[in-house]
Image (cartoon, helix red, strand yellow):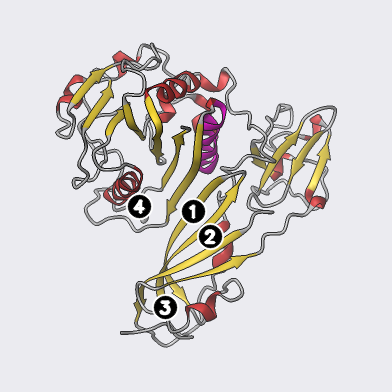
Amino acid sequence: MERINGRSRATIEFTLEWESDGVLHQDRLWTDQVNMWRDCFVPGLASALNDKGEGEEVRVRVPAPYLRKKLVEIRPHQFYAPQNPAEILSPRVGRFYPQGFLHGVSAVFQVSTAPARCVGLGEKLLFDLNHPLAGYDLTLSAKVIQIHRSGVERGGRCEDWLTLICDNGPGMQARSQNTATDFFSPQGRQRQDEAPDQVFYTAPRLVQHLDSTARSAIRDQYQGLIRPGARVLDLMGSWDSHLPEQLSLRGLTVLGMNEVELAANRKASTTLIHDLNQTPVIPLADTSMDAVICTAAVEYLTDPHAVFADIHRVLVPGGVLALAFSHRWFPPKAIGIWSELHEFERLGMVLEMFHLTGGFTELATMSQRGMPRPEDDPHQELPLSDPVFMAWGKKAG
């Protein structure tokens, strides 16, 4: 069996594992053509990978220092989008904004899109310019997926894999200093299309909204969270409940908006047509469900707090609530803030729903990015599979 050496190229799945205020996080990045000769690695990782074969995995600790000097104060009039200086913006506590929105700060340039987190409001605004993962105890694992035949090296691009793994979002799903993030203004819950949802969902949509690789990741995660013989509620569901075929259930109740879609769900034992935005009370008895899942739909809830509270009611103690989403949705019916947020902030928003509802424990999140587009997907113009983001927790017993 071929093993990694100093001149190998390989496909590797990197995973960051970390914890914020009792919440466990796992962020995965699938990467092709890792070059052991040319690329840069966190100290100890390259030597740990040496002589490893396909399927083997190594783990290293990653320092992520937090620097207090990266806390900066500005006046409210110094916070605006460079392309629109006449409009003074009002940041919200816990939210991230491009550093280029901060004017008059040393070493911050207006073209910068690096994240700045608002951590204080008042006569002056306080922003944290540290990386979102700064201050956390990180563990980085690298699993060897495939080792490619080595060829003659003639230069090429050098990748810094730690930077790529940590870049563009990981860390943004966590609260700042365990303080609630301000996601839920009334304006943010407004939608482009405020007509009754029954109108929008009149026509059935018997199509998949995510590619097969993303759906497989969601099924795998659900299988790990839901025990065999469970009573499961698929909330805001349709014709596919994204559950593995081999998972034997006591019952699957699918609550959705379109009768044709629900009738086509061959796993469902019970279907319910119900509009949660009109009536956020789920028409089920207290403690009647062992698990509640919601796939690619949480962004359509106009009163998520009321719905989460009622999910808590129908779950048994120890019951699981798990939500999954990607980067596809129907813009007219999603609440406005959803399209404004970075995709990892969306994960933070879902996690905040758990926090504010209360009564949930063992909270966790997962992200998966960088997988290749599956060959069976019609959108071959897109090189990568749809990203997957998930958050879950258990009802406290």
Q: Secondary structure at mark 2?
A: helix
From the viewer's perspective, is residue 145 above or below residue 245?
below
Tell me the residue that label 3 is attached to: 9
Q: Residues within 10 Å of mark 1 (few under 14, many from 20)?
A: many
Point out the tag, 3 or 2, that comes first from the N-terminus. 3
Q: Is residue 260 left or right of residue 305?
A: left
Q: Secondary structure at mark 3?
A: strand
Is there a contact, CB below 8 Å, between mark 2 and mark 1? Answer: yes
Magenta-highlighted stretch: main secondary structure?
helix
Is there a contact, CB below 8 Å, between mark 3 and mark 4? Answer: no
* Residue 38 appearing in the image: no
Q: CA distance from mark 4 to mark 1?
A: 15 Å
- Mark drawn on residue 385: 4
Q: Position of residue 380 (x, y in %)?
A: 29, 53
| Residue visible at 24% across and 19% down in the picture | 272
Q: Position of residue 370 (x, y in %)?
A: 42, 57
Give the extent of the magenta segment: 341-356
Point out the tag, 4 or 1, that comes first from the N-terminus. 1
Tell me the residue that label 2 is attached to: 165
> What amino acid is found at the position of numbered circle 4 in the picture?
Ser
Q: Position of residue 132 (x, y in %)?
A: 64, 49
> What amino acid is found at the position of numbered circle 3 in the picture?
Arg
Q: Secondary structure at mark 4?
A: loop
| Residue visible at 20% across and 42% down in the picture | 248
Q: CA distance from mark 1 to mark 3?
A: 23 Å
- Mark drawn on residue 27: 1
Point out the tag, 2 or 4, that comes first from the N-terminus. 2
| Residue visible at 33% across and 44% down in the picture | 222
